[in-house]
């Protein structure tokens, strides 16, 4: 490797793409193309970066397997940043195996970290955690250790383990300082903001209070019956009853929880559950049926009883009932709220990537995106398969509770 290639690689390693481009911008040999691609990726021109890396991979000879594998890893990282979650995990695994076999442990670990990040994005926490546990970051350079700790913190935050998340972020911050890469330091600072910004609202006794993630963790571990409007479950510290696929039952449960220890009139429940303004006996009959279903699914957590005016909820074991809601709620239905949660990271997403991350059909996701676009909540650019959707994040709020992850069960 000549001196210009070596100098450009060192510049990229410390996050200085402009210095790297000064050395290789006019060269079209395979190593220069690869370094130019990585530099363009660091500068944010992902389309150009991907094209350069593909040219570089074709330009390397079959005997240069390590160089080709590094190009595959770099392209996979660009796909991840572009939220192209459907890229070939098999190709990345093959590249990782090649790098590992040739002794390039650092880049092999980086490939593994990319796969963990993908699993984290789509909510497969158990798989991400198992894969991360196989990696010992101590022999790696500071940049790799920073990535490792950021992933540990990301998993902990999704599981609402704030103490573990803070410790991991502290380690990530120290490693980023040693690495002296501004982009890494900014990423750690951005991740740390999640722990210091409101994550949800606590609604009880007619009052509302904003909660941080650690407050949510404390609430879910307490002797409280929580109707969680962020993840659409009803739970206490021991039992979780999912109602995401039963919106009518959840609407009734939330209305009863907000009124606890009082009751809710039948007219209010009809409006909340069915959107009915004018009601007749058929509506009231349907309400009785749905309340009966709710009574059965919540039988281990609460009683739902009839009153003179309507219905009331009474917890079986918990000392109180509260509603956990999003920091900001608007007119959008729950299916579009989860789409907004992903778009709130400020990155551009394709509808296919959102479909994969949410576990819904692409057509359902597209309808939600069209609805949000009509309301001015999101915007798109590009056409066909290149079409991407994005929106600025809601300032001052975290969307961790809206992203897919299993709720912790005590």
Image: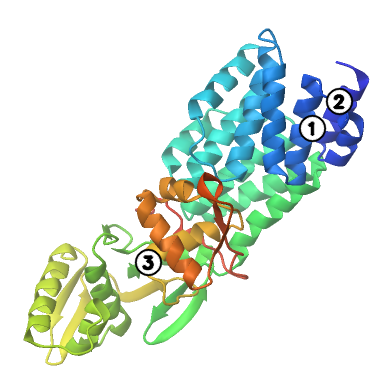
What residue did someone put label 1 on?
36
Q: Position of residue 247 (x, y in %)?
A: 26, 67
Mark 3 / mark 2, whichever is N-terminal:
2
Residue at point 48% right, 38% down? 86
Could you give the CA–CA distance between mark 3 and mark 1, rounded to whole angstroms? 43 Å
Find out whether the residues at labels 1 and 2 contact each other: C-beta distance under 8 Å.
yes
Cβ atoms under marks 3 and 2 closer than 8 Å: no
Indicate left or right for 135 with 208 as reference. right
Categorize mark 2 by other alpha carbons within 10 Å: few (<14), some (14-19), many (20+).
few
Residue 187 lies, with reference to residue 401, above or below; the image says: above
Q: Which residue is mark 3?
A: 334
Q: Position of residue 273 (x, y in %)?
A: 24, 77
**Helix, strand or loop status at disc 1:** helix
Mark 2 lies on residue: 27
Examine the rendered structure and indicate whether residue 101 appears above or below residue 167: above
User: Up-down: is 243 above or below 279?
Assistant: above
Q: Earlier in the sequence, mark 1 or mark 2?
A: 2
Residue 241 sits in quarter: bottom left
Crowd class of label 3 (few under 14; some 14 to 19; many from 20; radius 10 Å): some
Q: Are marks 3 and 1 in contact (CB under 8 Å)?
A: no
Foreground mark, 3 or 1? 1
SS type, badge 3: helix
């Amino acid at each position: 490797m000549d001196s210009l290639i070596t100098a450009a690689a060192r510049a990229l390693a410390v996050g200085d793409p402009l210095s790297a481009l000064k050395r290789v911008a006019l060269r079209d040999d395979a190593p220069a193309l690869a370094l130019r691609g990585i530099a363009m990726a660091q500068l944010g021109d992902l389309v150009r970066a991907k094209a350069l890396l593909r040219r570089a991979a074709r330009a390397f000879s079959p005997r240069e397997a390590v160089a080709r594998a590094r190009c595959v890893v770099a392209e996979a990282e660009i796909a991840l940043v572009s939220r192209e979650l459907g890229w070939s995990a098999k190709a990345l695994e093959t590249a990782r195996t090649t790098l590992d076999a040739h002794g390039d442990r650092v880049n092999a670990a980086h490939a593994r970290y990319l796969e963990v990040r993908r699993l984290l994005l789509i909510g497969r926490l158990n798989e991400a955690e198992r894969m991360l546990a196989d990696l010992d970051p101590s022999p790696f350079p500071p940049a790799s250790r920073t990535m490792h700790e950021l992933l540990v913190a990301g998993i902990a935050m999704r599981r609402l383990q704030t103490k573990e998340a803070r410790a991991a972020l502290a380690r990530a911050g120290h490693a980023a300082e040693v690495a002296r890469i501004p982009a890494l330091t900014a990423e750690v600072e951005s991740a740390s903001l999640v722990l210091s910004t409101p994550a949800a609202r606590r609604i009880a006794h007619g009052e509302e209070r904003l909660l941080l993630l650690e407050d949510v963790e404390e609430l879910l571990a307490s002797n409280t019956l929580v109707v969680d409007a962020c993840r659409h479950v009803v739970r206490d510290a021991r039992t979780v009853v999912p109602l995401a696929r039963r919106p009518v039952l959840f609407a009734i449960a939330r209305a009863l929880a907000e009124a606890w220890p009082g009751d809710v009139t039948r007219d209010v429940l009809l409006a909340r559950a069915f959107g009915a303004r004018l009601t007749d006996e058929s509506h009231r009959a349907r309400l009785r049926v749905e309340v009966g279903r709710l009574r059965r699914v919540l039988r281990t957590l609460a009683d739902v009883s009839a009153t003179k005016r309507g219905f009331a909820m009474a917890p079986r074991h918990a000392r109180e009932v509260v509603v956990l809601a999003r920091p900001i709620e608007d007119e959008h239905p729950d299916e579009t709220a989860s789409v907004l949660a992903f778009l709130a990271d400020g990155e551009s997403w394709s509808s296919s990537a959102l479909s994969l991350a949410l576990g819904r059909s692409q057509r359902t996701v597209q309808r939600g995106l069209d609805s949000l676009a009509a309301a001015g909540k999101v915007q798109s650019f590009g056409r066909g398969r290149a079409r991407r959707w994005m929106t600025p994040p809601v300032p001052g709020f975290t969307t961790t509770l809206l992203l897919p992850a299993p709720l912790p069960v005590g």
